Amino acid sequence: MDSAIQLIRSRSNPLLVHLRQVVQDPGGYRKVGAVWLEGDHLCRAALARGFVPQQVIFDERSLGEPALQVLAHAAARVVVLPSALFASISTLESPAGVGWLVDLPPPPEIDPLVDTLVLDRVQDAGNVGSMLRSAAAFGVRQVLALKGTAGLWSPKALRAGMGAHFGLALREGLEVEALKSLGVPLVATSSHAGITLPEARLPHPCAWVLGHEGQGVGDELLSLAALELRIPQPGGEESLNVAAAAAVCLYESMRRRVDA
């Protein structure tokens, strides 16, 4: 291992204080301008997309594992923590033993002409991460989150996204006004819409709009939509989980593009 190695044993070390701010506060990454990626899978997904860590943090019991050495070589600095200290910054029930601290990517410019996913005040970070994963899987490369949506780069959203974040153009904290710059039609989901997904003529490209888990898409945003539709549920449930609804809509949109 060529990287410089630092052993930290104090809980009050400035790096650990910094890391706790990132992992314990869902919006902490915005305050410090850095993101915590924990575990081999997330770190490798970031590495594959060209992300370079500020530093690699190891549980001392994992430092010598051959499979993790590529993650250590990616940064100029490797920090080693005793297991108890690593557990204190871990976001997992069973700490993964390795993590990266990476710079928060700068927000990209909004591309007005590509397939887009719009999140309107989606509250649960797990839902947010799952929706990003569906977007990446079904060919949507831009995600725009309105103010009030859970943090896109929060630890919980990152875990649920399973690496999807690194292939997406992500903007958050937006006002509804920002969506008026889009040159593609907005397609909003609503359990009260008269048109169902199977019978709707879906535009391509478009911006899919999914909303708050309880309140749905806001009225101001619905007024901008070119199409409002619902997912039929013959099983009788009142509504789908918003992450499940996103997966259904984005898959159907992709299927029709491929079949066209």
Image (spheres, rainbow, N blue to C red):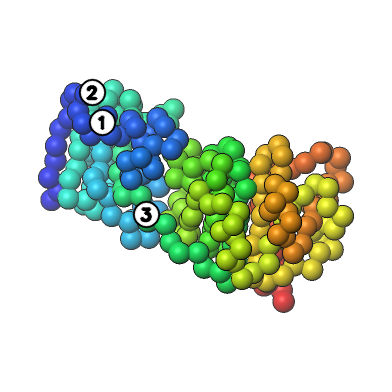
Q: Is residue 40 left or right of residue 154?
A: left
Can the viewer see residue 10 in this picture? yes
* Dots 2, 1 in contact, CB < 8 A: yes
**Vertical relation: 112 (above or below) 230:** below
Numbered badge on residue 11: 2
Which secondary structure lies at badge 2? loop
Q: Decide if residue 196 is on the left or right side of residue 84.
A: right
Residue plotted at (61% across, 43% down): 121
Which kind of residue does numbered mark 3 sit on?
Pro
Farthest residue, direction bottom? 260
Q: Residue at x 72, y 60 (%)?
A: 225
Q: Earlier in the sequence, mark 2 or mark 1?
A: 2
Q: Check disc 3 and report the residue beneath it.
A: 105
**Residue carrying label 1:** 16
Q: Specify the amino acid type for callout 1.
A: Leu
Q: Earlier in the sequence, mark 2 or mark 3?
A: 2
Q: Position of residue 7 (x, y in %)?
A: 15, 32
SS for tag 3? loop
Type of the residue with mark 2:
Arg
Q: Residues within 10 Å of mark 1 (few under 14, many from 20)?
A: some
In this view, the residue in front, 46 or 169, is 169
Q: CA distance from mark 1 to mark 3?
A: 21 Å
Label 1 secondary element: helix
Q: Dots 2 and 3: beta carbons under 8 Å?
A: no
Q: Position of residue 70 (x, y in %)?
A: 26, 52
The answer to whether mark 1 and mark 3 are in CB contact below 8 A is no
The span from disc 2 to disc 1 (Cα, nearest Å) is: 7 Å
Quadrant where the C terminus is found in the figure: bottom right
In the image, 111 versus 230, the foreground residue is: 111
> Callout 3: 10 Å neighbours few (<14), some, many (20+)?
some
Dot 1 or dot 3: first in sequence order is: 1
Q: Can you give x and y, in whole percent of width and height, for residue 180 in the image?
A: 61, 63
